[in-house]
Image (tube, rainbow, N blue to C red):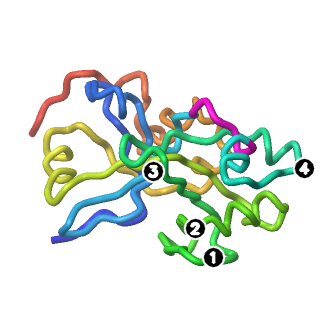
């Protein structure tokens, strides 16, 4: 069995789960036990400064402090996940690919607050999780499209454009997708 690695999961228009409606999820891990991903296009009501203040840290750099925090998914919304460029590692860093890493330890947030963090990063609260075989079943049901990860989409594209950009990577006009799909 092959597993999805270094892929974006793109919610089909018919996926009406409010946690995933038109979401783009960076798939960080997928194996026989299930899958873990971080939604990269749902901005939460928090800023980086607010998360840092919760940890007792401060940040003097307004560009960093005002950055949005993303709603990474419906599971463990009280846990922080930093998707970042891999030029450095911290206490709890997992390499997703040659372009991306995922860190869950506090030290990366402290480095970000001090302006010594990764060049590119996205801070999310929570994650999307699937049990063994669950994501595979959802793919069979045409709930998701998959596309290769683009660091531009993850870090640089405006969040409200990430779904359309991810779909367009597949050579598909996002407007042509319908909420009800068929199966061949």
Q: Looking at the image, which residue is at 43% across and 30% down? A: 173
Q: What residue would you read off at disc 2?
A: 105
For the record, the magenta segment spans 44-49
Where on the picture, by quarter, is residue 83? bottom right
Q: Residues within 10 Å of mark 1 (few under 14, many from 20)?
A: some
Image mark for residue 38:
3
Please tell me whether residue 165 belongs to the stretch shown in magenta: no
Give me the C-alpha separation between circle 4 and circle 2.
Answer: 21 Å
Q: What residue would you read off at disc 1?
A: 90
Give me the C-alpha separation between circle 4 and circle 3.
Answer: 27 Å
Give left or right: position of 77 versus 65: left
Check whether the beta carbons of the residues at disc 1 and disc 2 lie within 8 A of each other.
Answer: yes
Please tell me whether residue 46 belongs to the stretch shown in magenta: yes
Q: Looking at the image, which residue is at 48% across and 47% down? A: 78
Q: Residues within 10 Å of mark 2 (few under 14, many from 20)?
A: some
Q: Position of residue 64 (x, y in %)?
A: 80, 48
**Sooner in the amino-acid sequence: mark 4 or mark 3:** 3
Q: What residue would you read off at disc 4?
A: 60
Quadrant of image for the C terminus: top left
């Amino acid at each position: 069995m092959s597993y999805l690695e270094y892929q974006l999961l793109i919610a089909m228009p018919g996926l009406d789960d409010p946690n995933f409606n038109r979401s783009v999820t960076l798939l960080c891990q997928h194996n026989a036990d299930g899958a873990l991903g971080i939604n990269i296009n749902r901005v939460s009501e928090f800023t980086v400064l607010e998360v840092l203040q919760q940890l007792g840290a401060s940040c003097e750099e307004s560009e960093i402090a005002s950055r949005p925090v993303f709603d990474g998914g419906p599971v463990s919304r009280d846990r922080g996940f930093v998707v970042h460029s891999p030029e450095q590692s911290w206490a709890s860093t997992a390499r997703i690919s040659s372009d991306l890493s995922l860190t869950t330890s506090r030290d990366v947030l402290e480095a970000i607050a001090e302006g010594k963090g990764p060049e590119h990063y996205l801070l999310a609260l929570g994650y999307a999780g699937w049990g063994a075989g669950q994501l595979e079943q959802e793919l069979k049901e045409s709930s998701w499209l998959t596309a290769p990860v683009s660091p531009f989409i993850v870090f640089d594209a405006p969040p409200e454009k990430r779904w359309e950009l991810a779909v367009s990577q597949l050579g598909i006009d996002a407007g042509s997708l319908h909420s009800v799909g068929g199966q061949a």
